[in-house]
Amino acid sequence: MPVITRYQGLQDYSTTLQRMQQFNLARHANTPDEIWLLQHPPVFTLGLNGNAAHVLNAASIPVVNTDRGGQVTYHAPGQLIAYVLFDVKRNKLGVRDMVNRLEQSVVDLLAAEDIEARAKKQAPGVYVQDAKIAALGLRIKQGGSYHGLSLNVDLDLAPFKQINPCGYVDLEVTSMKQLGLATSIEQVTKNYLNCLCRQFSIEQITEIHES
């Protein structure tokens, strides 16, 4: 069964969250898996069990409570979002397996650019040295996954100073641009999708452009 990949451009976070939840509730045994590739306007998102104290100074940036795992993170244009709406039961995927594959997809992407990155078992995400370049959070409900991964490509990193990223005080955050990679987010999206498909052994995709 082909996986449907939706290119959605710039999308409001709260609206997208509602759409993911609705998709997951309506899922049935023959619902194709989907990957949503998009960007969000500036927003802080606080995970299901997140501590609001990790939002140090929201200023004019909205804070949205969400139902993924993890603490607080920041989204903005120039950051690639990959939401994975998979039937985890049908695909025989455990939570840890999904996390590992998502992290490795970013490690593979950066390796192709001669950037050495790694995951940390106790702190989900992808790091270059000690700076975080990709954050990860999932929700598994009724046998389906939603939410996913955010990869910093080319965005203003200053708002990360307004939070404790992912709940860690003074955690450094980086981006592909800061690492000297002059790749457009459109090209990164294409390259990342290839890495993601390899990690999840996806051989067929149906692409839909909605932006």
Image (cartoon, rainbow, N blue to C red):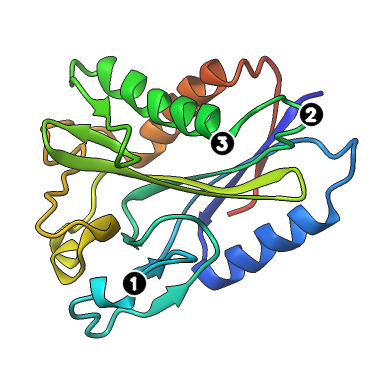
Alpha carbon separation for disc pair 2 and 3 = 13 Å
Whichever of callouts 2 and 1 sits on the residue coming sooner in the sequence is 1
- Residue position marked by numbered label 1 in the rendering: 51
Vertical order, 147 against 181 (above or below): below
Is the residue under label 1 in contact with that under label 2 (CB below 8 Å)? no
Vertical order, 101 against 177 (above or below): above
Alpha carbon separation for disc pair 1 and 3 = 22 Å
- Residue 55: percent from the left, percent from the top? 25, 74
- Residue position marked by numbered label 2 in the rendering: 90
Q: Is residue 9 visible?
A: yes
Looking at the picture, tell me which residue is in the foreground, 82 or 208.
82
How packed mark 1 is, by other alpha carbons closer than 10 Å (few <14, some 14-19, many 20 or more), is: some
- Residue position marked by numbered label 3 in the rendering: 95
Amino acid type at circle 2 is: Arg
**Residue 20 shown left or right of residue 125 in the figure:** right
Looking at the picture, tell me which residue is in the foreground, 48 or 129.
48
Whichever of callouts 1 and 3 sits on the residue coming sooner in the sequence is 1
Q: Give the residue drawn at x 21%, y 42%.
A: 132
How packed mark 2 is, by other alpha carbons closer than 10 Å (few <14, some 14-19, many 20 or more), is: few
**Residue 190 shown left or right of residue 90 in the figure:** left
Callout in the foreground (2, 1): 1
The C terminus lies in quadrant: bottom right
The N terminus lies in quadrant: top right
Q: Secondary structure at mark 2?
A: loop
Q: Give the residue drawn at x 18%, y 20%.
A: 116
Q: Secondary structure at mark 1?
A: loop
Callout in the foreground (2, 3): 3
Alpha carbon separation for disc pair 2 and 1 = 34 Å
Amino acid type at circle 1 is: Asn
Corner quadrant of residue 103: top left
Q: Is residue 182 visible?
A: no
